[in-house]
Amino acid sequence: MLFAIDPADVRPIYVQIMDEVRRALVVGTLTADDPLPSVRQLASDLRVNPNTVAQAYRELERDGVVHVKRGQGTFASNLNMNGKQRRTLAREVARRALRDAHRNGVNAEDLIWAIQAAADKSNRQAP
Amino acid sequence: MTQPLPTTLQGANLAVSTRALRKRFGTVNALDGLDLQVPTGAVYLLIGPNGAGKSTALRTLLDLVRADAGSASVFDLDTIKDGPRIRANIGYVPERTEWGYPWMRVGQLLLHHSAYFPSWDAAYAARLITLFELQLDRKLGGLSKGQARRVHLVVALAHRPPLLLLDEPIDGLDPIIRDETLSVLAEHFSDTPTTTIISTHHVSEVESMVDCVGAMRAGTLRAQLSLADLRAGLRRYRAEVPDGWAGAPALNGAVLRRAHAPREIQWTAWGPEAEISAHLTQAGAAIRDVAAVSLNDATLALLNPKADQT
Amino acid sequence: MTTLALHQPPTYGTVIQQQLRNAAGALRGAAIGLFAAALLFFILLTLLQSSGQLQGPGPSGFNLNSYETIPVWFVALIAAGALWQRDEPTRRGYHLAMPVNAAHHTAMRVGAGWAWLMVWVAVYLVLLCLLGLVLTLIGGGQFTSQMGWWGWLAPFAAATMSYLLASIPFVASEKPLAWIVAVPGGFVALITLPYMFKARALTSVLDSLMAGPFSPQAPFFPMFFRMQSPAVMGPRHPLELDWQTSVTAAVVWTIIGLVGVWLATRHRARGAQ
């Protein structure tokens, strides 16, 4: 799996790492019992402080998204991705979109209407 | 009521602390009452304009510069009394690139250095040499800025010191080596328990490694706080305001950076978001957007000479 | 404070060993240059001798005496300079940032340079003897030596004193060469003036000073223990340094040099290192 983080993002870096793991689980690039990169490896790859990666992994473990096998590393847990995780991710995406909308003077209702319209359009084109 | 910028890291277990450090060079106050507090294990970023005293502060810890007043300690040892012991525990990348003996070859310098630092990890040094593509038979005096910097990095890291003082460590490096260096540093922090002070103008490049920030100006700290606190407390507010808006007097002292346009403001302010937002709304501004600021923008705000707080 | 395992500084034995190695590196260029120059000079003399052009009016042969050691003080100056080349106090950060007491570290470096200088002087004396042997083999005559035990030691003492005195500005000053030119130059000017203006009271004091161990010529020319004073110094006192005075001078000026170096090692540069 590949991670993308942005230091300028509103979210702290450890949250971004958590979101990236969730995203990978939802889209399927990370499946149950897949190993996650080691803290050292990920810190080095992302050029971030290893403490930050460790914090992200700790929080993910607490949320049950990953589990630690002693001496072997961190692994993705077997979760129902259609459920809670997907909704968590959707909420985060929605929050971001709402913020963006507000900045552009668009209210929530207009945004929902626009999303629905755009989804209909892409659905018509897709099949 | 507005809150002043924090300048003390309370409750932290400090690896480095200075108390009211003063140093005058001729007519210039290089250090003017510096109270540096670096928690053990932290990556501490020292920011400030040129001449703010950042390098002098680092050199005081090595006892290369002796303060006129105040004191400094590293791992609870006094920098003047225990200089040799402290220096045995410091890896230092100097800002200047002439460092070491110009007639010496890179390989000789590494050997020489390893003898002075009994904790030298030869295997690690060899790995860094390969990674940084160092040519061991080159003379130090003939190295380019970037090559010299890489030699200094190896020399500073290879004995795995508990304290790293990095004065512009990535300045003069090409983008590829710069990126490689940051990766090496991240790995180093994983492998070795290290407290690090980085002084650099390349703020955005090191942002994701930093735990604490010290903003220095004119020899003193204008702000000193954890990055988490900085991210939580410093926000950029964009708002629409009526014509001829009188401003928000209640926020005097909290706004560090202001940008105005007709009927629109963009302020960077310090304080709890709810409180600042409430003051803005009360004053008649319609807040459109509240955003976290990047460390680079935070730097500009913290060091803004025209800020309300002085 | 955590129970962090702090690293230990190196032992002084290690530092001395490193400084000896370092000094060898710093002095390498100068050593090669000086050795080449000496060799060239000796070859030239040998060639002149074999073509018969070196024969003076007197009896042939080779008389090793204290005059042959004049170059030693100059060599000592070069050694001090080479050891601190491009390493003025404000550029000495690397040396001073090492985990060793800064003053001790500097002193050890001076000592390491001195050790190599002694090797140089020994090599020089060996070369001189070889030259004497070669010249007498070619030109015939006797290879004699007027040097007593002190004559053999004098070059080492002269080198030591010149080296210590020259090290003071190299250790402590940003512009050591200016000091090295200005101090002896100023001194000569100062002692010449009383003679030029025939200030009798002053010249007699100076004359007696010149004859004793505090003579400023003593540190640089202790090997001249039979040297006649220059004519400007006045004819009344044939200013000779007998060997006892010369030995005393060596001791006195070595102590002055050591104190000077010790003070210099404690000097801290004002600006950035």
Image (cartoon, coloured by chain):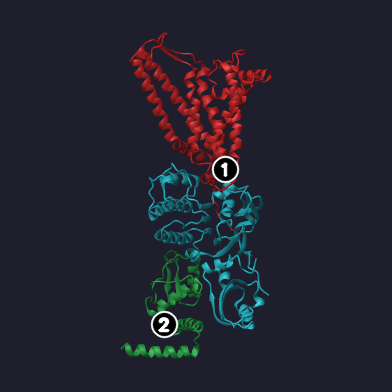
Q: Residue at x 39, y 88 (%)?
A: A118
- Above or below, comparing residue C74 to residue B198 in the picture: above
Instruction: Name the spot of residue B250 as percent of width and height, x first.
Output: 67, 77
What's the colour of chain C in the image? Answer: red
* Furthest residue toward left: A127
Amino acid type of disc 2?
Met
Q: Which chain is green?
A: A
Q: For residue A33, which quarter of the picture?
A: bottom left
Give the labeled residue for mark 2: A81
Q: Is residue C79 left or right of residue C214?
A: left
Foreground tag (2 vs 1): 1
- Residue under label 1, please give it: C102
Farthest front residue?
A: C197
Residue C63 visible, this angle? yes
Chain B palette colour? cyan
Residue C196 x/y as whole percent? 61, 21
- The chain carrying label 2 is A
Chain ID for label 1?
A: C
Q: Secondary structure at mark 1?
A: helix
Q: Quadrant of residue B146 in the image?
A: bottom left
Image-based side of B139 in relation to A63, left or right: left
Do the residues under discs 2 and 1 have CB atoms within 8 angstroms?
A: no
Can residue B93 be seen? no
Q: Using a 10 Å C-alpha cutoff, classify the residue at mark 1 as few (fewer than 14 neighbours), some (14 to 19) or many (20 or more).
A: many
Is B88 rendered above or below residue A99? above
Q: Is residue C87 above or below residue B89?
A: above
